[in-house]
Amino acid sequence: MIRRVEAFDLDVRRHVYFAVVASARPPTVAETAAALETGEAEVEAAYRRLHDAHALVLYPGTTAIWAANPFCFDRTPHRVTAAGRTWTGTCCWDALGIPGAFHGDGVVDTVCACCGDPLRLEVVEGELARGADLLAHFLVPARHWWDDIVFT
Amino acid sequence: MVFLRSEEHLRRWLGDNGWEAGATLAMPALNQLARRWWWTRLDPGWRPRPVDESQAILDELGLTGAFWELRPAG
């Protein structure tokens, strides 16, 4: 069930993405509270509402941010170079979404899920300059993507 | 949602894990989807996208049918 988010939550979310773009890591509750000059309890509640609304993904049982899609802050096989930094993509869709989110070019260094062999894709002016012959596979039907987003 | 080198690697990956096939996209199609889906994610005025708008993106890219249906059944 996707929950509604409040205006304050959108301010919190805006700060989270601002911080991610600036530092390539997600802000803690304390950092966001300090930046917005508000209380940590309010920010914790906002992080949880944003998680419930699928606007952030928290580590289970915590208020630490696992992903602010398309960016992931844990280990995955998908390294993305875009906008002058190296990022981690949550999955194949998000990996290619990072250059898209920056409206720019990018390089995805990843692996074949079958054999682990390294794969490289390059996006130039919105098109695949390398990797166009590769495949993407979605195991989980769309309406179940958020049932277990880490598996998805 | 994973990258695979080829159809042969896809079949082997599904078989090794005992999984049924879901949906396979050619990489240019995934790239189009990724750009459309995430294009506004860093906009300062971003708001949650209604499910009908997300469904419309899938529809416009030809991703239709039960597998791509975001709305709950029924």
Image (cartoon, coloured by chain):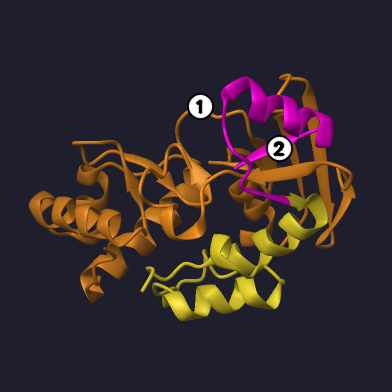
Chain colours: A orange, B yellow
Please give the name of the residue rendered at 63% of the width and 70% of the height, measured from the top-left corner: B64
Residue B42 shows which numbered tag? none
Q: Which residues are magenta?
A: B1-24
Horizontal relation, residue A19 to residue B25: left or right: left
Q: Chain of mark 2?
A: B
B3 is within the stretch colored magenta: yes
What is the x, y in percent for residue B44? 46, 72
| Residue picked out by circle 2 | B3
Please give the name of the residue rendered at 47% of the width and 80% of the height, measured from the top-left corner: B52
Residue type beneath disc 1: Arg
Horizontal relation, residue A15 to residue A87: left or right: left
Please give the name of the residue rendered at 36% of the width and 53% of the height, measured from the top-left corner: A56
Q: Residues within 10 Å of mark 1 (few under 14, many from 20)?
A: few
| Residue picked out by circle 1 | A75
Residue type beneath disc 2: Phe
Quarter of the figure that contains the N terminus of chain A: bottom left
A146 is within the stretch colored magenta: no
What is the x, y in percent for residue B13? 68, 26
CA gap between label 2 and label 1 equals 16 Å
Looking at the rendered image, the disc whose residue lies closer to the viewer, 2 or 1, is 2
What is the x, y in percent for residue A93? 62, 50
Q: Is residue B72 above or below residue A62?
A: below
